[in-house]
Image: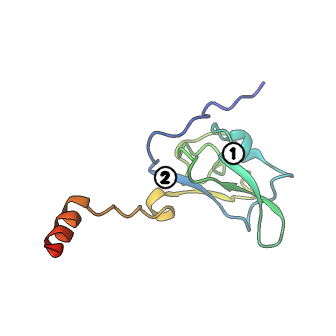
Amino acid sequence: MWTKLMNRPRKKPPKKIAIIDPERCFGAFACSICQAACPVEDCIIEEPDVYGRMVCAVRVDKCIGCGLCVTVGNPTAPQPRDFGCPPDYDAIDMEAFEDVVPPEPQPEAKASGESGEGAAAS
């Protein structure tokens, strides 16, 4: 029986995450090798592309950056292995997390904002 190893939130963002090119994905119902290779539950999901085909997509909030789904022989794969997205599709690459997910803006310090408002009110 196959079970997913990771079913809890990740502790910190990975350095790289998997990105699937929907134009190259053969289709979620026809292939799904990437879903089988992924150790994280519900990380790679099916969604319609611009043509209405169901293709695989990576949830950036779940991806841990392991690279197990990446195309066999792809230079972006973190380690060699004999499974993953088939080479004739080559639909998955690893990209830097910061290039895919922009950093969240830092909240302004309340202490400096409150003291400025108090000084203005006086």
Quarter of the figure that contains the N terminus: top right
Q: Is residue 120 left or right of residue 97?
A: left
What is the x, y in percent for residue 11? 46, 39
- Dividing the picture into quadrants, the one containing residue 3 is top right
What's the CA distance linking mark 1 and mark 2?
17 Å
What is the x, y in percent for residue 5? 62, 30
Q: Is residue 117 left or right of residue 77?
A: left
Whichever of labels 1 and 2 marks the residue nearer the N terminus, that label is: 2
Quarter of the figure that contains the C terminus: bottom left
Residue to which mark 1 is pinned: 84
Task: Residue lying at the far front in this picture: please name it.
Answer: 122
Q: Which amino acid type is shown beneath numbered disc 1?
A: Gly
Which residue lies at the image location 80% right of the left edge and 59% below the top edge? 26
Task: Residue lying at the far right in this picture: please name it.
Answer: 30
Residue to which mark 2 is pinned: 16
Dot 2 falls on a residue whose secondary structure is strand
What is the x, y in percent for residue 104? 41, 61
Q: Which amino acid type is shown beneath numbered disc 2?
A: Lys
Which label sits in the foreground, 1 or 2?
A: 2
